[in-house]
Every structure is written in structure tokens, then in C-alpha cells.
Amino acid sequence: VQAGSPILHGYFRSSCSWRVRIAFALKGVEYDQLPVNLIKDGGQQLTEEYKALNPMQQVPAVEIDGTTLSQSLAVIQYIDETRPGPRLLPADPKARAQVRMISDLIASGIQPLQNLYVIQKIGAEKMQWSQHFIDRGFQALEPILKQTAGKYCVGDEISMADICLVPQVYNAERFKVDVGKYPTIKRLNEALLEIEAFQVSHPSRQPDTPDDLRA
């Protein structure tokens, strides 16, 4: 661990951790990773040691500038406000509100309903449950993105909305959702996956990625 570098406590397949990795990559910020395995040992996020970092016992937690932050959207906005490089939230207030609206729709309205903790409680219906809530969210997201999108989710600049979209589409594909039903979501996701920041941060390329899932 380099002195002074931010430290990301995350998990390769956690979409909230992936959001933070994308933000660091877009800003060109060097950081260290301390993986937290959400499956092994009954879940390493449940240890007292990790609970001290993030009382919600979720990933990510980020140690940065002498403070510890959790909640990926708060982390992304902090990175945006403190680090040079491309803006992750547009200058225009309406566009910025649209970015936050899309980010919140995904981060509050879709992802929590299919995250690991919830589906572990559901039992046998995991797949149908996850598909239902992702489809429900995407049915709302598709017409919104039709209105706001240019090359990316809001106009032609990459933003926090794009940072939220790509990991959510990855989850949708994991849960066998037919993303083809959502042509705007599909087009944006494909365009974003061409960009290096989204590739280097991908779950298949992390230090804790299992060998059979490596790209």
C-alpha cells in the first residue's frame, strides 16, 4: 500500500465497488485495493474490523485524504470535487439533476433489491426476484435515457450516471435479464465498455477476481 494513496476496500463483483473503480480510472487517480470477500468465511464484511470502517457492513469503503467514506455516490462526488480531470457531474444544473436522477434510480431503485444480502434472504427464488426488480427498474430507465442521452447517458459527456449504468447492466446479464428489450440501455452500455476506464475497472480484471472469471 503506497503512503498517501486512497485505499478501496471492495469486492471484484460488487457493482458499488466497480462504480468507485470507474471514477478513479476516469480521473486518473492511483489507488490501492484491499479486497473484502463477501462470500468467504461467511462474509469478510461482517467482521468487527470491517464494521469499524463501514458500520453498514457493505462494500465499498474508501480511505481517502484522512477520512473514511462509504456509499458509492458520496465517494464518486467527493472524488469529483477534489480531483482534477474530467467532470463526473455536468456544470449545467438541469443536466446535473438528470445525472443525479439516473444515478439514484439505479443506486436506490434497482441495485439494493438484488444485492447479495437481499437475495441471500430470498432463498430459492433468487433469479426470478432479481429479474423482476431489474426489469422493473429498466422499464423506467429506458424512456428516461431516451430523453436525456446523447453519446452517453446525459448528453455527450461521461458522468456519474454512466458510472452507475454499466455495473447495473453487468448485474442484469448475470441474472439473465434480456437487455435487448432496452435498446437505449444496450447501446449506451456497449459504447461505454469501449472506454478504457470501464475496461480496467471491470470485475474480470481485479486483484481478487477468481481465475475462472478472469479476462
Image: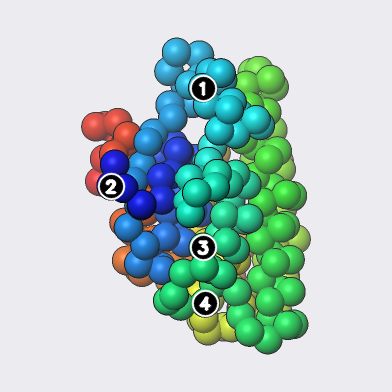
Type of amino acid at the residue the image marks with label 1: Glu
Identify the residue shown where x is 70% and y is 38%.
113
Does residue 17 show up?
Answer: no
Type of amino acid at the residue the image marks with label 2: Gln
Q: Residues within 10 Å of mark 1 (few under 14, many from 20)?
A: few
Looking at the image, is mark 3 or mark 4 earlier in the sequence?
Answer: 3
Residue designated by label 4: 87
Q: CA distance from mark 4 to mark 2?
A: 26 Å
Name the image quarter holding the N terminus: top left
Discs 3, 1 touching: Cβ within 8 Å: no
Residue designated by label 1: 49
Identify the element where label 2 is drawn.
loop
Q: Nearer the viewer, mark 3 or mark 4?
A: 3
Residue 198: x and y, percent? 39, 61
Res 116 quadrant in image: top right
Q: CA distance from mark 3 to mark 4?
A: 10 Å
Q: Nearer the viewer, mark 4 or mark 2?
A: 2
Q: Which mark is residue 67?
A: none
- Residue 123 sits above or below residue 91 on the image: above
Res 94 quadrant in image: bottom right
Identify the residue shown where x is 50% and y is 49%.
66
Residue 122: x and y, percent? 69, 22
Q: Residues within 10 Å of mark 4 (few under 14, many from 20)?
A: some
